Amino acid sequence: MYKIFETVDDVSRYTAQRLLDKILAKPAAVLGLATGGTMEPVYAQLVQMLQQQPTDLSRLTTFNLDEYIGLTESHVQSYRYYMDEHLFDKLNLPRERVHLPDGMAEDIDGACLAYSAAIQAAGGLDLQLLGIGSNGHIGFNEPYTRFSSRTHVIALSEQTRRDNGRFFSDQDEVPIHALTLGIQDILEAKEIMLVATGPNKAEVMAELHHSGVDEALPASALKQHDNVTIVLDREAAALLPSAEWRAVQTVQLLAG
Ligand code: PGA
């Protein structure tokens, strides 16, 4: 199902509201969280909503999708740092309830096994938030990752390293490897919300729309899931067929 909004602000408010609704409906929810530029305004909205509506977060559990290998948690580009900065510190979430793959683990394979197992032990993901790479990756599952994958080490594609180079002072500083939740882990979430904004995502969203289920396009795995919402702004939706655009009018009216 598509939800198409006019602006990034609308997208972020809608997505944050869905996260908040989930927490209110199930205070012990297990949330799968994502990083990246797309999620920054989503988390800003969520923090603002939670300030206006104080909510008990003490039973919430979170698992992030991915982490670079080789960046310590004090590195400003590590995803741990990102999450602390944009969400965890602002909400005062108990550290023992928030989880990210450990990109500094000595036993990386053991850490991967333990990460997927910890999600299952927590009861599985109630809601998985996803961004999408310009090459169709979800988490850091690059093209041709097996759809049956669990948490694993991935060599980042050149396209991903280029895309993410904008966050680093030097392109060469972008790590070569990362840890990511597997596609199977993602598909086991009860509900999935994929968010994409801006003109750089228009092509991959059209590709995803027309694609069959194909390991060449990791996000196409989501077509096997029966509870996925794709949340887009006008720019990311620009190359979708016109039938999808009729939905824009409805959503715009609903968004008021
Ligand atoms: P972005 O990243 O939000 O920075 O575009 C999305 C992703 O790579 O999943």
Image (spheres, helix red, strand yellow):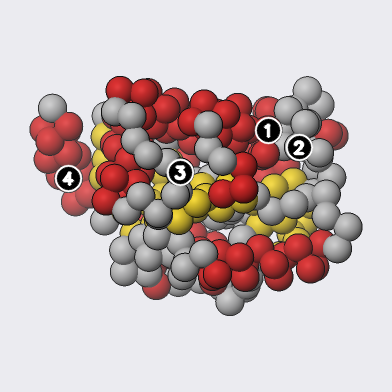
Q: Amino acid at mark 1?
A: Tyr
- Left of 11 or right of it: where is 39? right
Question: Label 4, on which residue?
Answer: 247
| N-terminal-most mark, 4 or 2 | 2
| N-terminal-most mark, 3 or 2 | 3
Residue, x 62% and y 48% (percent of image)?
A: 96
| N-terminal-most mark, 1 or 2 | 2
Pointer 3 local density, CA inside 10 Å: few below 14, some 14–19, many at least 20: few
Dots 3 and 4: beta carbons under 8 Å? no
**Residue sitting nearer the eye, 48 or 230:** 48
The dot on residue 58 is 3
Q: Residue furthest bottom?
A: 148
Instruction: Measure the C-alpha gap from mark 1 to mark 3.
Output: 21 Å
- Left of 3 or right of it: where is 207? right
Quarter holding the C terminus is top left
- Relative to 193, say whether 54 is above or below: above
